[in-house]
Image (tube, rainbow, N blue to C red):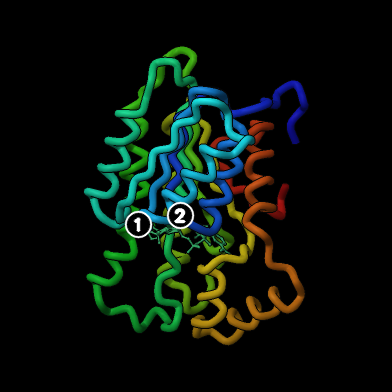
Amino acid sequence: MASPARGRADFGRALCVITGASRGFGRALAKQVSGLVRAGSVLVLAARSADDLQTLRAELTQSGASPPGLVVQCVAADLGSAQGVESVVTTCKAAFTEDIDHVFLINNAGALGDVSRYLKGFTDMTEVNSYLSLNVSSMLCLTASVLQAFPPRPGLRRTAINVSSLTALQPFPSWVLYCTGKAARDMMFRVLAEEQPDVRVLNYAPGPLDTEMLRNAVSRTADPTIKKSFVDLYAKGEVLTCEASSSKLMKLLLEDSFTSGAHVDFYDI
Ligand code: NDP
């Protein structure tokens, strides 16, 4: 792990984009990031639920933990569409100021997809494309657009995070859409790390989190073994809070000693 000398105390004067910030892990990330940025930073929070984003915005701007002058921009958009991605990028460009020294993108938004069927049930290409559009294409296009909008310059750090999963590495029966999406996202970011050594790139698997997504997984998973593994996690009290996992990610990012492009799991840290 990092030597203290390499660690950072905060994320600097950042433009930080968090997708899927309306609830669950993204919401916890927004709260913790807001306490670790300097005055003059901008948070761009994206999701479809405008009201939930506004509630979070009010909490962050009124919180004593946020730095003075923190700007929080909400983008109520469907990231499964090109327009949704464009609206996030437009907001980022408008919010950027020359004294920002860190562009920080957290690709967190995602969907479980239908886990009630096995692979042989997925014959509808429109359904599959729609899933990949949100979970893979939008992350690629958003990351590319942000990197293009804020090219390298002296004094500007750039960080890109993919909220990944164990399923990027391990096949879960009846989770074909989810596993495919997460595996693709990890590889996308491994390529990015190879192409752009100046960008700090991370695939972070947050562990099993007590969110709407995991609760849906428990109730809807077709495969009995996978389903039981989630039921057992709850029964044994092994499901994590979003705050605990987000804290570990913050620690990892501040220590800044991970290999760019690596897949790091909550349980590895
Ligand atoms: P939730 O379902 O609780 O939250 C998902 C977030 O993504 C919400 O803010 C939702 O906002 C947003 N989102 C969903 N669809 C869209 C869309 N079309 N456009 C814009 N935003 C969208 O999930 P989690 O918090 O559990 O998951 C967050 C990330 O963590 C995901 O990438 C997930 O795969 C990953 N993960 C989760 C694990 C878990 O155990 N929960 C384990 C490993 C990884 P809205 O509905 O307002 O649009």
**Residue bearing the label numbered 1:** 48
The reply to whether callout 2 and callout 1 are in contact (CB within 8 Å) is: yes
Disc 2 Cβ-to-ligand 1 distance below 8 Å: yes
75 vs 161, nearest the viewer? 75
- Position of 145 compared to 70: left or right? left
Residue 130 % position (x, y):
28, 65
Secondary structure of the residue carrying tag 1 is: loop
Residues under labels 2 and 1: Cα distance? 8 Å
Q: Which mark is residue 156?
A: none
| In the image, residue 207 above or below residue 121 | above
Q: In the rendered structure, which amino acid carries the disc numbered 1?
A: Arg
38 vs 216, nearest the viewer? 38
- Position of 68 compared to 234: left or right? left
Disc 1 Cβ-to-ligand 1 distance below 8 Å: yes
200 vs 91, nearest the viewer? 91
Residue 42 % position (x, y):
45, 31
| In the image, residue 183 above or below residue 145 | below
**Residue bearing the label numbered 2:** 22
Residue 30 % position (x, y):
53, 44
User: Residue at the location (47% across, 65% down)?
Assistant: 179
